[in-house]
């Protein structure tokens, strides 16, 4: 019993149910699922507590529920969590979690996550760093609302607390093999057991691969791969549990993951007038993109993407962590040390125009990607007395973030720019032409007809574009490099005073010091920037002599043409530009909660929490007009959250029903938005999120049948603001749909439900099923709220049927994801250079916005949700 007793003491915080949930010799119920509400234990306050005693909204998901819903990564988790959305965009490295409508797009590595991801006590500073196969799960806790007191500065919207299986002294080996549609194949092997009298180990290795979810029309090439969004990765995780004495336990973890996949193409959801130019450039190799719908409306759902360049992505993730706990009987306390080192890196190539024409792309040559490395150390001392539960701690981290970025011009870039510049030319003077770029970049000026003085052109049959006029040379246009170093130190405390047997008060405080330093080099290559320079030289018509050609005059390049020719990737003002910025900041955040237990079945609570999300830097080329922004800095974000909740335990402890009203106000909300040319973080003055969370777990009277579900009602809106309220007023036209509007990715209603059944069938067999579903009302998938990015209400359903031996030596699962073949969008966006959504940025509409759907000429693309997948999994265990 020596091992058993020590194990119970040191690992209760990792239990899903009860104090002994792992396979130790002598504990017969180790693998059993919870059977009553009292069995549900959480660590939302960094100590083990019954879910019904914690004055926090927590959706806790046991191993059985996670397995039944097919959860392998964070994205799978959303089907079980009301009020949470998880999306990916340009790559799987751009994965973002949002809770209660709060969160930000993950395409900018300078922006830290609003929803913190913690895996076995180790904080992952970006959602993408926490994305991957989670391995053998014990449970997951989703904590809603700011959790900065105990979980750190960048948890302003919530925390996903992931607890994996620990080593066991009871030896066992398990394996699984999966096959499914889209050519899916995968498998894993796990082994655990004693290595000595005081050391237990666990190892887990998995490999999974799958064909793509998209068919790809490769257009001009050189791409040859006709599918996209493939899966191909392997992961390994090794652990040691060391119990040198009755007072000490040490857990060591090492993990490594490598992904080598193709992702992420997008499909057209609305095709604008520029499709004619795309088709002309892609001919004879196909249309280049989908033909427009009637009246340039939306086009039917399709999983056919157009991409002439490949989309490889390579992700490498590795880390080490050490957790040591020491019991201090004299203080009735425990000292915990959590140390971690992580190194995550990502490289990609991509088709930037999402068409079959060869316009813009990123090379997969090591010049496109980013990485995060960090070292963390946390100490916690937690104890208890008759009246107090107390905790004090220190957290410190050093982090490095780098980003490499480059663009390459394709063979069709000059032709496409020429088409755009001459799009309005009448047929009488040559019409739109793919060979008139030099008219706008010739330093000698260009010509217009007297009959059409606002229509620039080189007169057909009279003047050809100058051979000396600079254009865009095919190949790499620029290479930029950014490096950010940050240090953060925090002191924190969390204490509960049991005023009476029924009434508790909780106070938490956290003092954070944060500093960051950004170094960057932005550098054009070769002749890149010369075309813009020529256009800029033509801006002053007073320097142009009258034309010798009758009926024409020389004029300067119009502002609209300069805007196209001097985009961030072609602007000479970035040539060899050095960036050096730094800041330091301090903040005090915390929480105050009061809870009252009316009886054993009902507890009510009220809470206030303040969260803090650190300031940072845009790691991208950001300009206003043609002038690069002097600073890439954006402000810190804060949130004040109020909650009123009641937790009830009903029907002889077989059901829990928890209900919470929340009211959150974010100030300087860090909105990451795509301006069509760059990702920029703009601080929105205020975002409010109000609503109700309801969670239910019911262990039904039917043996082996359990239901778990929840409902979230969210009213998340931006406040009214004007251009003067933004850090850069020039960005207001593109954000003018936001004031007073519902935030993106914030469905008004979100409902989840999971029905699980598992019991003995007799004859040595065991069987069951799981049905999981999530319904979301409509919401917008774009940070600028353009109506073509709307996603209508949809429902996703997953299912699983299981049969196996009573002793679980073998099990067969038949499963399906998205069984109803729901067609939905993850994120919508306006295609670069392909039309304009905000055609007028100088005079507002009658409603105060700068958007008119009647004049929107943009082509819209979308990253889609996964289709229906199905398969069979064989599991064995010894």
Image: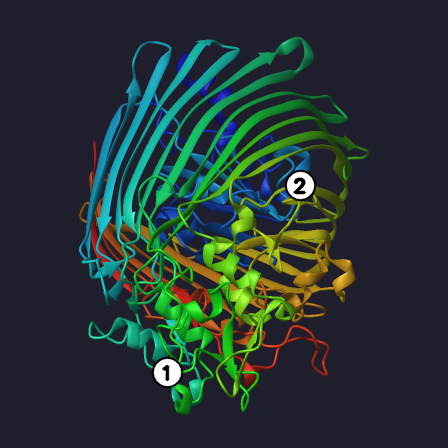
Q: Nearer the viewer, residue 386 or 368?
A: 368
Please give the residue where the numbered disc 1 appears in the rendered image: 292
Which quadrant: the N terminus?
top left
Residue 91 spot, x, y in % from top left: 39, 51
Please give the residue where the numbered disc 2 appears in the rendered image: 615
Disc 2, SS: loop
Residue 713 spot, x, y in % from top left: 62, 65
Horizontal arrangement in the rendering, residue 219 relative to residue 290 (left or right) = left
Q: Is residue 122 visible?
A: no
- Relative height, residue 737 to residue 119 (above, below): below
Q: Mark 2 or mark 1, which has the lower sequence index?
A: 1
- How far apart are the alpha carbons under marks 2 and 1? 42 Å
Image point (46%, 61%), residue name: 753
- Relative height, residue 476 to residue 855 (above, below): above
Q: Nearer the viewer, residue 409 or 91?
A: 409
Q: Is residue 606 visible?
A: yes
Neighbourhood count class around disc 1 (C-alpha, 10 Å): few under 14, some 14–19, many 20 upward: many
Horizontal arrangement in the rendering, residue 661 relative to residue 73 (left or right) = right
Which quadrant: the C terminus?
top left
Disc 1, SS: loop
The extreme right residue here reads: 499
Q: Nearer the viewer, mark 2 or mark 1?
A: 1
Q: Nearer the viewer, residue 384 or 421?
A: 421
Horizontal arrangement in the rendering, residue 301 relative to residue 737 (left or right) = left
Res 251 label? none
Residue 308 spot, x, y in % from top left: 27, 62
The image quarter containing residue 264 is bottom left
The extreme front residue here reads: 548
Q: Nearer the viewer, residue 24 or 287?
A: 287
The image quarter containing residue 659 is bottom right
Residue 293 spot, x, y in % from top left: 38, 85
């Amino acid at each position: 019993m020596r091992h058993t007793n020590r194990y119970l003491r040191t690992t209760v915080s990792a239990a899903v149910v009860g104090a002994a949930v792992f396979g130790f010799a002598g504990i017969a119920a180790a693998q059993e699922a919870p059977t009553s509400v009292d069995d549900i234990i959480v660590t939302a306050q960094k100590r083990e507590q019954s879910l019904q005693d914690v004055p926090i909204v927590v959706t806790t998901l046991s191993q059985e529920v996670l397995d039944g819903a097919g959860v392998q990564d964070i994205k799978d988790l959303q089907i079980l969590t009301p009020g949470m959305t998880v999306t990916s965009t340009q790559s799987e490295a751009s994965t973002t979690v949002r809770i209660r409508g709060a969160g930000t797009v993950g395409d900018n590595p300078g922006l830290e996550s609003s929803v913190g991801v913690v895996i076995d006590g180790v904080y992952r500073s970006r959602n993408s760093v926490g994305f991957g196969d989670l391995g053998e799960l014990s449970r997951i806790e989703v904590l809603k609302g700011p959790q900065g007191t105990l979980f750190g500065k960048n948890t302003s919207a919530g925390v996903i607390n992931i607890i994996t299986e620990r080593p066991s002294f009871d030896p066992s080996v398990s394996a699984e093999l999966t096959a499914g549609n889209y050519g899916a194949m995968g498998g894993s092997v796990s082994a655990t057991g004693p290595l000595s009298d005081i050391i237990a180990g666990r190892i887990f290795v998995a490999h999974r691969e799958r064909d793509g979810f998209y068919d790809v029309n490769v257009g001009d090439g050189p791409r040859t791969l006709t599918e996209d969004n493939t899966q191909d990765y392997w992961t390994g995780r090794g652990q040691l549990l060391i119990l040198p004495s009755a007072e000490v336990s040490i857990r060591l973890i090492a993990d490594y993951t490598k992904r080598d996949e193709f992702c992420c193409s997008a499909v057209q959801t609305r095709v604008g007038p520029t499709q004619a130019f795309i088709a002309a450039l892609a001919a004879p190799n196909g249309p280049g993109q989908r033909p427009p719908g009637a009246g340039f409306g939306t086009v039917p759902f399709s999983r056919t993407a157009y991409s002439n360049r490949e989309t490889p992505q390579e992700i490498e993730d590795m880390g080490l962590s050490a957790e040591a706990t020491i019991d201090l009987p004299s203080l009735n306390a425990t000292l915990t040390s959590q140390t971690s080192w992580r190194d995550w890196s990502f490289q990609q190539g991509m088709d930037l125009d999402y068409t079959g024409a060869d316009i813009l792309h990123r090379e997969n040559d090591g010049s496109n990607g980013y990485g995060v490395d960090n070292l963390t150390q946390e100490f916690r001392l937690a104890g208890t007395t008759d009246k107090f539960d107390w905790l004090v701690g220190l957290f410190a981290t050093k982090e490095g973030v780098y980003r490499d970025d480059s663009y390459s011009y394709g063979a069709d870039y000059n032709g496409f720019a020429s088409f755009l510049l001459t799009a309005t030319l009448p047929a009488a003077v040559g019409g739109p032409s793919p060979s008139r770029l030099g008219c706008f970049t010739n330093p000698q000026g260009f010509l217009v007809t007297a009959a059409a003085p606002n229509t620039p052109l080189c007169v057909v049959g009279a003047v050809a574009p100058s051979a000396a006029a600079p254009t865009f040379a095919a190949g790499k246009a620029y290479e930029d490099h950014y490096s950010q170093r940050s240090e953060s130190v925090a002191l924190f405390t969390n204490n509960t005073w049991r005023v009476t047997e029924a009434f508790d008060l909780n106070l938490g405080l956290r003092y954070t010091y944060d500093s960051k330093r950004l170094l960057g080099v932005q550098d054009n290559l070769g002749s890149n920037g010369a075309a813009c320079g020529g256009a800029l030289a033509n801006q002053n018509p007073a320097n142009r002599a009258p034309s010798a050609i009758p009926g024409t005059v020389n004029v300067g390049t119009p502002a609209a043409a300069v805007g196209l020719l001097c985009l961030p990737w072609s602007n000479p003002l970035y040539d060899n530009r050095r960036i050096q910025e730094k800041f330091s900041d301090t903040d005090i955040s915390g929480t105050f909660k009061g809870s009252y237990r009316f009886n054993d079945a009902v507890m009510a609570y009220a809470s206030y929490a303040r969260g803090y999300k650190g300031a940072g830097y845009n790691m991208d080329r950001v300009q206003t007009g043609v002038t690069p922004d002097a600073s890439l800095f954006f402000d810190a974000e804060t949130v004040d959250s109020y909650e009123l909740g009641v937790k009830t335990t009903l029907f002889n402890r077989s059901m829990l029903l928890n209900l919470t009203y929340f009211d959150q106000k974010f100030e300087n909300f860090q909105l990451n938005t795509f301006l069509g040319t760059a990702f920029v973080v703009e601080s929105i003055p205020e975002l409010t999120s109000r609503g109700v969370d309801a969670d239910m777990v019911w262990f039904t009277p039917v043996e082996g049948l359990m239901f778990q579900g929840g409902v979230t009602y969210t009213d998340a809106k931006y406040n009214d603001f004007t251009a003067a309220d933004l850090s850069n007023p020039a960005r207001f036209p593109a954000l003018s749909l936001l004031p007073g509007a519902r935030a993106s990715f914030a469905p008004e209603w979100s409902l989840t439900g999971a029905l699980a059944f598992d019991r003995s069938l007799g004859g040595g067999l065991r069987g069951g099923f799981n049905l999981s579903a999530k319904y979301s009302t409509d919401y917008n998938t774009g940070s600028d709220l353009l109506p073509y990015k709307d996603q209508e209400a949809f429902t996703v359903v997953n299912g699983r049927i299981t049969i196996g031996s009573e002793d679980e030596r073998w099990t067969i699962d038949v499963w399906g994801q998205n069984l109803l073949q729901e067609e939905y969008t993850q994120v919508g966006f306006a295609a670069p250079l392909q039309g304009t959504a905000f055609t007028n940025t100088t005079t507002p509409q009658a409603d105060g916005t700068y958007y008119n759907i009647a004049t929107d000429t943009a082509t819209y693309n979308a990253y889609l949700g996964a289709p229906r997948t199905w398969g069979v999994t064989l599991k064995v265990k010894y």
